[in-house]
Image (tube, helix red, strand yellow):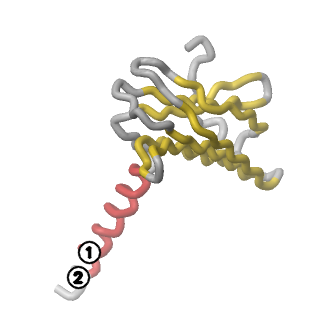
């Protein structure tokens, strides 16, 4: 019996890691989206937002992009305020990044109403295995 005691701990640890990892890819009912498109040797990162029930207050956004690879580490953050109308898609920010095979990208888009986060999307990927959007979308 004493050989089985680590098993529940190990099982719960693995489940915790998987749930935590999967949680980085979730979004809320409001639609915050990160689009990645390949443009020549660069990736174009676009932060988008839409909602069917817009608030009466101004919203704010933060788009953070981190690239790490053989060439070092680079980071950029864009933020601002915006208004949105129901049923429209707002382009909030765009950023270009030179990323080669094996580089790691971490992209976070947060939408806030005051201090409350109303929508969030995150992408963590290794180039070239990143969720690219067709440029004709």
**In this picture, is 112 found above or below 2?**
above
Relative image position of residue 131 (x, y in whole percent): 55, 32
**In this picture, is 8 found above or below 56?**
below
Q: Residue at x 39, y 29 (%)?
A: 54
Q: Quadrant of residue 6?
A: bottom left
Quadrant in which the C terminus appears: top right
Relative image position of residue 77 (x, y in whole percent): 68, 47
Residue with the mark numbered 1: 7
- Number of the label disc, if any, that sits on residue 98: none
Q: Quadrant of residue 19?
A: bottom left
Relative image position of residue 84 (x, y in whole percent): 48, 26
Label 2: state its secondary structure: loop
* Viewer-side residue, 12 vs 91: 91
Q: Locate residue 24 relative to residue 77 in the image: left or right.
A: left
Most distant residue in the left direction: 1
Q: Locate residue 135 relative to residue 97 in the image: left or right.
A: left
**In this picture, is 24 found above or below 128?**
below
* Viewer-side residue, 5 vs 29: 29
Most distant residue in the bottom direction: 2
Quadrant in which the N terminus appears: bottom left
Label 1: state its secondary structure: helix
Q: Residue at x 76, y 39 (%)?
A: 100
Mark 2 nearby-residue class (10 Å; few <14, some 14–19, many ≥20): few
- Asked whether disc 1 touches disc 2, contact meaning CB atoms under 8 Å apart, the reply is yes
Residue with the mark numbered 2: 5
Mark 1 nearby-residue class (10 Å; few <14, some 14–19, many ≥20): few
Most distant residue in the right direction: 71
Relative image position of residue 81 (x, y in whole percent): 58, 38
Task: Measure how far apart labels 1 and 2 are at the Cα level.
Answer: 5 Å
């Amino acid at each position: 019996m004493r050989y089985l005691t680590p098993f529940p701990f190990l099982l719960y640890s693995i489940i915790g890691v998987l749930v935590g990892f999967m949680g980085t890819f979730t979004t809320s009912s409001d639609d915050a989206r990160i689009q990645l498109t390949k443009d020549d040797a660069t990736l174009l990162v676009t932060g988008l937002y839409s909602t069917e029930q817009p608030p009466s207050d101004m919203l704010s956004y933060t788009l953070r992009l981190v690239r790490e690879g053989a060439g070092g580490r680079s980071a950029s953050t864009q933020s601002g305020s915006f208004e949105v109308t129901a049923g429209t898609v707002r382009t909030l920010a765009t950023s270009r990044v030179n990323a080669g095979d094996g580089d790691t990208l971490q992209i976070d888009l947060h939408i806030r109403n005051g201090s409350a986060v109303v929508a969030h999307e995150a992408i963590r990927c290794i180039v070239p295995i990143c969720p690219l959007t067709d440029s004709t979308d």
